[in-house]
Image (cartoon, helix red, strand yellow):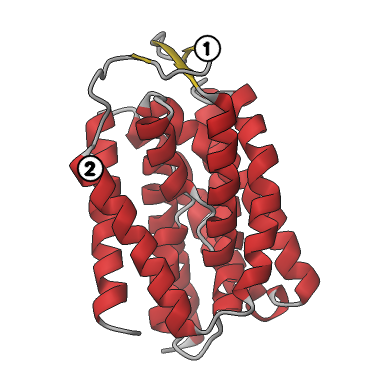
Amino acid sequence: MTDFLQWGLLALIGLCVGVLGTLIGAGGGFILIPILLFIYPQESPALLTSISLTVVFFNALSGSISYGRMHRIDLRSGLWFSSAAVPGAISGAYVTSYLNRELFQLIFGVILLLVAVYLTARPRRKHGGSHNSISGGTVRKITDSNGLTHSYSFNMPLGIGIAFFIGVIGGMLGLGGGIMHVPALTQVLGFPAHIATATSHMVVAITVLAAIGTHAVSGTMSEGILRALVLAAGAVIGAPFGARLSQRVSETVIIRLLAAGLGIVAVRLLIAPF
């Protein structure tokens, strides 16, 4: 493959990651990491996660800007969750250097499969609607740019604890954590799916930046920075399209798409090593 085709393919992959990741509220790492494992079979997990996290950051940042214009981000909650996820992501990024490819792939596949099974079995909370509630006392009321009001309440301490755990896993596996943030926000805390996807993007952007800094300090970033920037350029272009597409897709469809994508990738990782 010529250099031109190689860089063009990476940009196209980044574009797809940007569209799909932003649509479901994830940075796209769950799509990108398996692709990187396939096209770079000799590279270490630490290098691949540093590439993925760089792409996830730019994608999440671009998506957050788009969602911010739609007034769908729960800013106050996102900042609280980010304050817990950042130290978790830093810890996870350090752990990555101690994982070989086989163990990395096994952990990655199992986590994706568990999330996919949970979402398939319980795609949305039973009470549904625009008003969700869970004990805890934190109440939010957000009106988006379309004039739709989302009212919900949730347990903030529980959300902060979940954010820290997701930060560890996301930083360790190069995911950013969006594939876990969205299910946690919708299924456990009771966020409306459209608010969850938007808020997740903001949390992912902040969290991943901390993990990238950890990789930069360790020197891992230097080997993959050019590949990461090409992928990120494609993701930045694709992210706004994913955000606009989300306005035309129902909450249930968003969650079903997330479950299907996770399941396919998980099975591929577990049954056939790259």
Mark nearer the N terminus (1 vs 2): 1
Query: Is any atom of residue 242 visible in this view?
Result: no
Secondary structure at numbered mark 2:
helix
Percent of width and height locating residue 201: 52, 40
Question: Label 1 is placed on what type of residue?
Answer: Val
Provide residue 170's location: percent of width, then percent of height: 54, 57
- 72 or 126, nearer to the observer: 126
User: Which is nearer the eye, 49 or 161?
Assistant: 161
**Exactly how many numbered labels are in the figure?**
2
| Residue 15 locus on image (x, y percent) | 43, 57
Residue positioned 54% across, 13% down in the render: 137
**Quarter of the figure with the C terminus:** bottom left
Residue beneath disc 1: 139
Q: Is residue 7 visible?
A: yes
From this view, report whether residue 69 is shown above or below residue 64: above
What residue is at 45 percent from the left and 88 percent from the top?
Answer: 2
Determine the CA span between mark 1 and mark 2.
27 Å
Check disc 1: other Cα within 10 Å, few if <14, some if 14-19, many if 20+.
few
How busy is the neighbourhood of tag 2: few (under 14 within 10 Å), some, or many (20 plus)?
A: some
Tell me: residue 85, above or below residue 192.
Answer: below
Please name the residue that numbered disc 2 is placed on: 256
Examine the rendered structure and indicate whether residue 41 appears above or below residue 92. below
Task: Give yes or no for contact between labels 1 and 2 (Cβ–Cβ under 8 Å).
Answer: no
Which corner quadrant holds the N terminus? Answer: bottom left
Residue found 41% across the figure and 60% down from its top? 30
- Name the mark nearer the viewer: 1 or 2: 1
Residue type, mark 2 in image: Arg
Residue 173 horizontal/vertical position (percent): 52, 65
120 over 246 or under it: above or below:
below
Judged from the image, the secondary structure of the residue bearing numbered disc 1 is strand
Residue furthest right in the image: 217
Determine which of the numbered discs, if any, sits on residue 106 in the image.
none
